[in-house]
Image: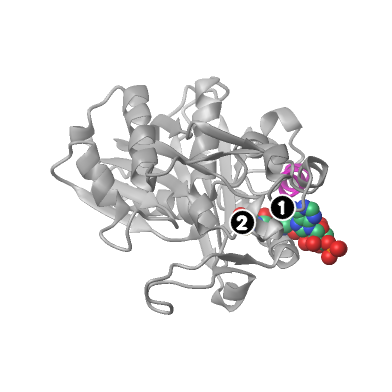
Amino acid sequence: MNPGTAPRSVVIGCGGYLPAKVVANRDLESSMETSDDWIVERTGIRQRYIAADGELTSDLAIAASRAALADAGIDASEVDLVVVATTTPDQTFPATATRVQAGLGMVAGIAFDVQAVCSGFVYAMAIADNFLRVGQARTALVIGAETFSRLLDWSDRGSAVLFGDGAGAVLLRAEADPRDGQGRPRGILSTHLHADGRFNEALHTDGGPSSTPGRVGVVKMNGREVFRHAVEKLSSVVEEALAANALAPSQVDWLVPHQANRRIIDGMARKLGLPPERVVVTVDRHANTSAASIPLALWEATRERRFARGDVVLLEAIGGGLTWGACVIRW
Ligand code: ACO
């Protein structure tokens, strides 16, 4: 790194992992009063992946990380920061990140989990970016991994149909003043995080280690309230992110939103004036994988070579807390 040049975090690899078991909407019709039509019309979800018995969040995260390392062509020993965004850790402690670290054969570095539910990956990217910018780490493995199916009340059709399991991983490397072919700064340009704990009740679990010892609880959600907040708060954080970079909506090349609901995604795309082919959508196949949804979408888009060097890629998410945020990357 040149002295005096502020480093920037550049994405050098993406990976993902989805469990083998696919559960289509129709498969749910026998166990709850719902229908493929209702789920598709309200959410755009057609199927979800569900982890096998004994398959843990760390297993998903390790598989996604291996794919990201292979994509970047680097060894795990080069990673000095592991951040796992998850709401479904293997255990209350230690952090799932330390299990991932051990699983990858790493014996050094920093490892911890981030809990911001569906905004977790954007939070984790912001945290890793700050570590890299100040020089406290050089190569960060940022993971979103969930076995969210294990937090669901399968008798609550209002929430159970929405979620799935999976993991995505992104490798970030600190580079001194990285530029694209036109001389524009590359990498993470800015991150924007928010939280408002007054809305805890909109989306929460009815238990946890401190409040209900021995019982983790299940998801409780006021779908309409979450929907209303999602549209309002995502619009505002996207405006904030664009203004911070003096970008017009027309200068966004790709929207990679948290994959909760097709209607929310389409609403955000319309606000930005982005045509559907510039929005990365996986919710139809993955459902809502909470912190894993954005890195899984990035994995899919990069495997399909959809992003070109210099493209502006906008990530946005909202989740329990409420927490929400955005991240602007020049690819
Ligand atoms: N199948 C069939 N009927 C259902 C189902 C289901 N799976 N779930 C609810 N219904 C019924 C309800 O019982 C209700 O019936 P009623 O009128 O007889 O009482 C009817 O459908 C309408 O229910 P609403 O909850 O009002 O339906 P709405 O149009 O709001 O859609 C939904 C519900 C899809 C949850 C929507 O509110 C939503 O997407 N909200 C955002 C929530 C979200 O994305 N959460 C994910 C976590 S947070 C995040 O990631 C951002």
Q: Tell me the kind of residue under disc 2.
A: Trp
Quarter of the render that holds ligand 1 = bottom right
Residue 26, horizontal then vertical, whole percent:
73, 38
Is residue 264 located in the magenta-colored stretch of the structure? yes
Report which quarter residue 114 is drawn in: bottom left
The earlier-in-sequence mark between 1 and 2 is 1
**What residue is shown at x 46% (from left), y 26% (from top)?**
180
Find numbered disc 1 in the image and state the secondary structure of the residue it sits on.
loop
199 to 186, vertically: above or below: below
Left or right of residue 321: residue 70: left
CA distance separating discs 1 and 2: 8 Å
Residue 32 circle label: 1
Tag 1 and tag 2, C-beta contact below 8 Å: yes
**What residue is shown at x 61% (from left), y 56% (from top)?**
154
Residue 132, horizontal then vertical, whole percent:
30, 47
**What residue is shown at x 51% (from left), y 25% (from top)?**
302
Q: Which residue is mark 2?
A: 154
User: Is residue 191 in view from this perspective?
Assistant: no
Find numbered disc 2 in the image and state the secondary structure of the residue it sits on.
loop
In the image, 7 versus 279, the foreground residue is: 279
**Does the magenta stretch mainly form a helix, a strand or a loop?**
helix
User: Is residue 151 in view from this perspective?
Assistant: yes
300 to 173, vertically: above or below: above
Question: In which quadrant is the N terminus drawn?
Answer: top left
Check mark 1 vs ligand 1: CB closer than 8 Å? yes or no: yes
- Badge 1 crowding class, 10 Å Cα cut-off, few under 14, some 14 to 19, many 20 or more, is some
Q: Tell me the kind of residue under disc 1.
A: Met
Query: Where does the magenta region start and end?
Result: 262-270
Residue 245, horizontal then vertical, whole percent:
56, 47
Is residue 198 located in the magenta-colored stretch of the structure? no
